[in-house]
Amino acid sequence: MPPVFKLQPLLDLSKLRLDEATRELGQLIAGEQEASRRLAILTQYRDEYQAQFRAAAQRGISREEWNNFTRFLARIDDAIVPAAQSVALTQQRTLAGKQNWVGKQGRVRAFDTLADRHRAVVAGHQNKAEQKVSDEFGARQHAGQDPQSDLLSLLAADRAKLGLLT
């Protein structure tokens, strides 16, 4: 069995935290989209009501109707302000969530790189051990000795030195 990558628990934990950050970012993006949708609806409603007000004013309306239109437009404007603030706040939270996610992704990438290097070193050691056994086998065969005598024990000894023996 090849030597264990000693940082594997940290890699696993980093991947878990990246998954959590991904879910959180998805929720933040959904919240931002919902806040933007609400603001767009209010703004559209205000524009439509403003158009109705202009059309009515061109036809001629009483002072009371005028006041009703302007009061209602003011209420819509009062609702738009917190909705716009909510959009700005959710955008800030989404940006912070993206930065958090990028940081977690970088950490996972760093541990993945270390794991890849570890696997390459282990594979190199395995290849060297196998090449050594092959060379020994060839040398014994060339020397006229029984190439299979002690071959298995030689292979086992080399693998044990490398920590590859199960």
Image: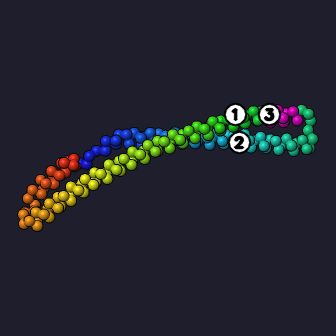
Task: Name the one closer to the observer, 6 or 74.
Answer: 6
Residues under labels 2 and 1: Cα distance? 14 Å
Let me know if residue 69 is in the magenta part: yes
Crowding around mark 1 (Cα neighbors within 10 Å: few <14, some 14 to 19, many 20+) is few
Q: Residue at x 39, y 49 (%)?
A: 113
Look at label 1 and name its amino acid.
Pro
Q: Is 159 left or right of 108, judged from the image as shown?
A: left
Which disc is residue 41 wearing?
2
Which disc is residue 117 wearing?
none
Which disc is residue 82 wearing?
1
Q: Is residue 23 visible?
A: no
Dot 3 falls on a residue whose secondary structure is helix
Q: Residue at x 31, y 51 (%)?
A: 119
Give the image quarter of residue 46: top right
Residues under labels 3 and 2: Cα distance? 16 Å
Residues under labels 3 and 1: Cα distance? 13 Å
Note whether 135 is above or below 28 in the view shown.
below
- Give the mark nearest the N terminus, 3 or 2: 2
Q: Position of residue 26 (x, y in %)?
A: 54, 42
Task: Name the one closer to the observer, 22 or 99.
Answer: 99
